[in-house]
Image (tube, rainbow, N blue to C red):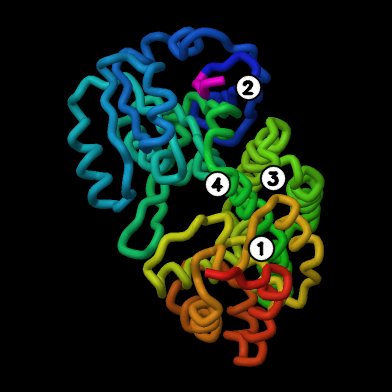
Amino acid sequence: VEPSLSFSRSTFVVVFPPNRLTGATVILNSALSGPLEGTLDPELLAKPIVLTQPEPWKLVQSRFPDVTIVHIVSDIDHELTKARTEGWRNCGASCVVGVGGGMALDHAKFCSWDLELPLILVPSILSVDAGYTRAIGVREGDRVKYVGDASGSLRHIFVDYNLLQAAPPILNSAGAGDILSCFTALWDWERASIELKEDFDAGVAEHIRSACLERLYSDASELAAQTEKGLHTLSELFIEEVRACEKWGNARLEEGSEHYIGYALEATTGKHYIHGQLIGMCILLAAVYQGQDITRVVRCLKDMSVDCSFTAVKTSREEVRHVLLRMDKYVAQESQLLPGVFHFKGAPSESEADSMLDAVDKHFPPQNP
């Protein structure tokens, strides 16, 4: 079946009430049929701006009117994104639609926020949770900066299983890294409450473990097989994780030292990685340094067919070792990062770093080039 934005059996629609992104969400297991314009208010589609990427656009372009303004997103540089958006300010657009992965969705969120236009998001891969967050991520050099708030403009999120299933499986399965990261982020949070008297809610932490981590463990093989159940589960987990973080007031529940390693590696090498796959590797590294048992995390990653070997992530043991030995300096420099294991223990020693790296090699042996 050709992927589309409104396929009767394989689409569910997440509808958000005005001015809330993760409030009382309603998931409609929808029996949609016909073209997109039969699903939405026709005025929304009178003249949309579509921020997209080549592969998904080929699959959905027939669903949009001829007057659609299309931009193929290849970067999310802050200044370039602002300049492009400014060029559309007086074009008479009716809405902004993001179709694609994280860059396309963030660009669409920025555009709708800046131009004060209604927003529709259509993730074509579930590699990150960008389609479900109010924060708008842009890049300034090798750093991600969050600007603006898309909650006031968002009208719909369409999750089309056929569109998702058209993508390489790793781009969906790896997205679970932003759920699995709760494993190490919660450790950081709880330890910060002991070391620094940071506010900590054991009930919230337990809810994340049961509602997000346990459910991911249970459905990991479904995600590996790219079944509708697996993709639906990951979509709902993103919604649950984002809702919980926004209710708490920050990303403490989901982002911790595992993300800091990933950010430091990106800053050091200047390379871009499949985000969730990178985070999966970094979860193992951080968890070992935290002293946690990684058995269930390893099993989950394998059940999802997410290879976290250094070669699969497209890095090397040497690159990662270099980063680990300097993590104390990195977190001191990046003062916006909430306290985690590298704040409490400093950078690992050479022997500790080798033990962390050995754990990755043990469970995800090096691949032949």
Nearer-N-terminus badge (3/1): 1
- Depth check, front residue: 143 or 63: 63
Q: Name the residue nearer the viewer: 99 or 27.
A: 99
User: Which residues are drawn in magenta?
Assistant: 1-5
> Mark 3 or mark 4: which comes first in sequence?
4
Disc 3 versus disc 2: nearer the observer: 3
Disc number at residue 185?
1
Give how far apart the Cα atoms at labels 3 and 1 are: 24 Å
Disc 4 marks which residue? 171
Say which residue label 3 marks: 224
Mark 4 neighbour density, 10 Å: few (under 14) some (14–19) many (20 or more): many
Where does the N terminus fall, quadrant-wise? top right
Q: Please tell me which of labels 4 and 1 falls first in the chain.
A: 4
The Cα–Cα distance between marks 3 and 4, rounded to whole angstroms, is: 11 Å
Pointers 4 and 1 in contact (C-beta within 8 Å): no
The answer to whether 230 is drawn above or below residue 69 in the figure is below
Disc 4 or disc 1, which is closer to the eye? 4
Amino acid type of the residue tagged 2 in the rendering:
Ser
Residue pictured at 54% horizontal, 86% vertical: 325
Q: Tag 1's secondary structure?
A: helix
Identify the mark nearer the N-term, 2 or 1. 2
